[in-house]
Image (cartoon, rainbow, N blue to C red):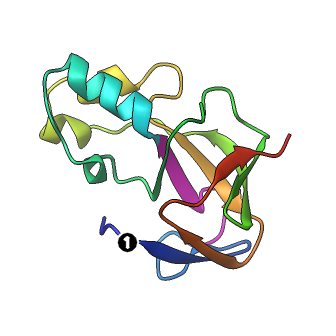
């Protein structure tokens, strides 16, 4: 995963240029606070890119968000479900996969509803 300051999203497809296009899992999202809480508890400092999520949000709990609509800047994402962490996380830090498994710790996945550009620092809120 390459960090970017901005990305174009396409309704019904996902992030322009991303390998995963279409379906319900067009974007994956993690929470900064959850990531930091679990990596701190494990005593490690790991770049969030190790999680391989497309977006990181802050100040907004994703737990139980299935069916809710998230606004990121001027674009909307319908949260379709919970992203379960995979074994690759244990390559970054032993025990990280298990630490992130409960209560949406691995984040969420969703469907892009609007074309547009999202940027680091855009406001992120739930619409409902």
Q: Which of 63 and 117 is in front in this view?
A: 117
Residue 22 counted in the magenta span: yes
Residue 119 x/y as whole percent: 52, 69
Q: Identify the main secondary structure in magenta.
A: loop
Residue 44 x/y as whole percent: 13, 29
Q: Report the quarter where the N terminus lies.
A: bottom left
- Residue under label 1: 4
Residue located at (22% from left, 48% from top): 47
Number of marks in picture:
1
Residue 49 x/y as whole percent: 29, 54
- Residue 114 higher or lower than 68, as above or below: below
Displayed quadrant of residue 67: top right
Displayed quadrant of residue 65: top right
Report crowding for label 1: few under 14, some 14 to 19, many 20 or more residues within 10 A (C-alpha).
few
Q: Report the quarter where the C terminus lies.
A: top right
- Residue 65 higher or lower than 52, as above or below: above
- Residue 32 higher or lower than 123, as above or below: above
Q: Which of 106 and 76 is in front in this view?
A: 76
Residue located at (22% from left, 23% from top): 40
| Residue most extreme to the right | 128
Residue located at (51% from left, 69% from top): 20
Residue 75 placement, left or right of 90: right
Helix, strand or loop at mark 1: loop
Residue 64 counted in the magenta span: no
Residue 8 x/y as whole percent: 57, 79
Q: What stretch is highlighted in magenta?
A: 21-30
Residue 53 placement, left or right of 98: right
Residue located at (50% from left, 41% from top): 58
Q: Nearer the viewer, residue 17 or 60?
A: 60
């Amino acid at each position: 995963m390459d960090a970017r300051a901005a990305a174009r999203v396409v309704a019904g497809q996902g992030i322009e240029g991303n390998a995963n296009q279409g379906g319900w899992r067009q974007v994956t999202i993690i929470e900064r606070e959850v990531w930091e809480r679990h990596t701190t508890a494990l005593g490690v400092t790991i770049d969030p890119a190790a999680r391989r999520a497309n977006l990181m949000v802050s100040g907004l709990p994703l737990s139980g968000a299935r069916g809710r609509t998230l606004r990121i800047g001027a674009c909307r994402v319908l949260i379709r479900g919970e992203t379960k962490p995979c074994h690759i996380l244990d390559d970054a830090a032993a025990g990280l996969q298990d630490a992130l498994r409960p209560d949406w710790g691995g984040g969420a996945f969703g469907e892009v509803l609007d074309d547009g550009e999202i940027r680091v620092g855009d406001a992120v809120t739930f619409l409902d």
